[in-house]
Image (spheres, coloured by chain):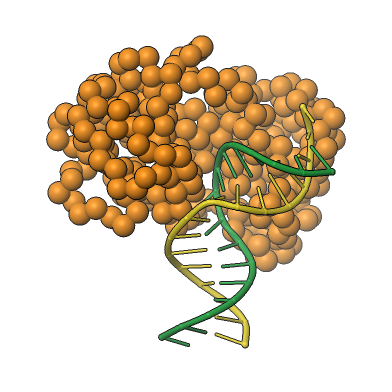
Chain colours: A orange, B yellow, C green
DNA sequence: CTGAGCACCTGAGGGC
DNA sequence: TGCCCTCAGGTGCTCA
């Protein structure tokens, strides 16, 4: 489900609600999601959440003892903060009971998500994040950066954009939308991009991701805001999920190919 | 090192 | 109605 704009939306909603709260009790309803949940039982009770922010598609909540709670929503993860009197939903796996009586509730149908506690290392982040590329909305993600890092890369440009080590947090929806906006064929070898195309890609990525955040992300089927509402960017999608429909610019039938195992919709006329 | 393929898991939707 | 197949916002492993 969630790419950068969706996780950013969740982070912005959660930060004011969770900052300063102390976790008093951990209730587990499944032994594991992507990874085992039992470590939370010893790592979290008594800990106070210092802040909450997003990096790539992860939510990171530094705690008061030099560790951080790291949450990933996988494909179908939903976080709500409500009260335990609301009946537990079928796929809610974890409740974190907070000191004001509210409950952080984690739901994940497919269980590709995860909740883990890691020590905070260099740069205020757990060690694993050192391998991630720049945030696409930061200045570090520049045309020059993209050009240099794509040299000699033979992989399809779409797969390249979806690589967290290149740039963090761009997934299947936004990669398709960004490449359509930039007029670049998703099958194109990354190493053949010109510097001008890299400039255009960076510009389109920034514009589309910012607009998606403004709209509260994209709800296809599972994604929900912390308050249960839905993201409004779906109506703005130009090509994702529209294989066989006419291109919104030129009317040519949109095509779908598999790249890196993911469906990739594009306009064979507008994207070269 | 790179790149491709597959596994993880549940549910929805289409074809028969 | 039911069965079987394919597909879905991600990540991380193995293999060549």
Query: Residue A222 at what x, y percent from top left?
Result: 42, 54
Q: Is residue A263 above or below residue A26?
A: below
Residue located at (79% from left, 55% from top): A269
- Residue A214 in sight from this viewpoint: no
Q: Is residue A108 above or below residue A39?
A: below
Left or right: where B9 falls relative to A148: left
- Residue A255 in sight from this viewpoint: yes
Left or right: where A139 falls relative to A38: right
Query: Residue A96 at what x, y percent from top left?
Result: 26, 36
Nearest the viewer among C2 and A18 is C2
Query: Residue A124 at what x, y percent from top left?
Result: 46, 14
Residue located at (46% from left, 39% from top): A35
Query: Residue A62 at what x, y percent from top left?
Result: 37, 20
Residue located at (15% from left, 49% from top): A85
Q: Residue furthest top?
A: A122
Left or right: where A170 falls relative to A218: right
Nearest the viewer among A119 and A133 is A119
């Amino acid at each position: 489900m969630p790419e950068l704009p969706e996780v950013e939306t969740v982070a912005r909603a959660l930060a004011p609600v969770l900052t300063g709260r102390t976790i008093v009790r951990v209730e587990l309803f499944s032994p594991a999601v992507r990874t085992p949940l039992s470590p939370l039982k010893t790592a979290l009770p008594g800990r106070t959440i210092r802040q909450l922010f997003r990096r790539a598609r992860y939510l990171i909540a530094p705690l008061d003892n030099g560790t951080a709670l790291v949450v990933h929503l996988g494909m179908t993860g939903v976080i709500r903060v409500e009260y335990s009197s609301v009946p537990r939903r079928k796929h809610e796996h974890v409740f974190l009971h907070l000191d004001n009586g509210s409950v952080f509730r984690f739901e994940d149908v497919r269980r590709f998500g995860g909740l883990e506690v890691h020590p905070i290392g260099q740069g205020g982040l757990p060690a694993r994040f050192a391998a991630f590329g720049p945030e696409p909305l930061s200045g570090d993600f520049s045309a020059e950066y993209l050009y240099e890092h794509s040299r000699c890369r033979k992989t399809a440009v779409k797969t390249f954009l979806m690589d967290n080590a290149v740039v963090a947090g761009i997934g299947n929806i936004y990669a398709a939308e960004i490449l359509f906006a930039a007029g670049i064929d998703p099958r194109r070898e990354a190493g053949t991009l010109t510097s001008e195309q890299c400039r255009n890609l960076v510009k389109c990525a920034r514009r589309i991701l910012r607009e998606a955040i403004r709209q509260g992300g994209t709800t296809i089927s599972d994604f929900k805001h912390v308050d249960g509402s839905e993201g409004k960017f779906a109506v703005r999608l130009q090509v994702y999920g529209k294989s066989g429909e006419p291109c919104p610019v030129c009317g040519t039938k949109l095509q779908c190919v598999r790249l890196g195992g993911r469906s990739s919709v594009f306009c064979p006329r507008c994207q070269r």
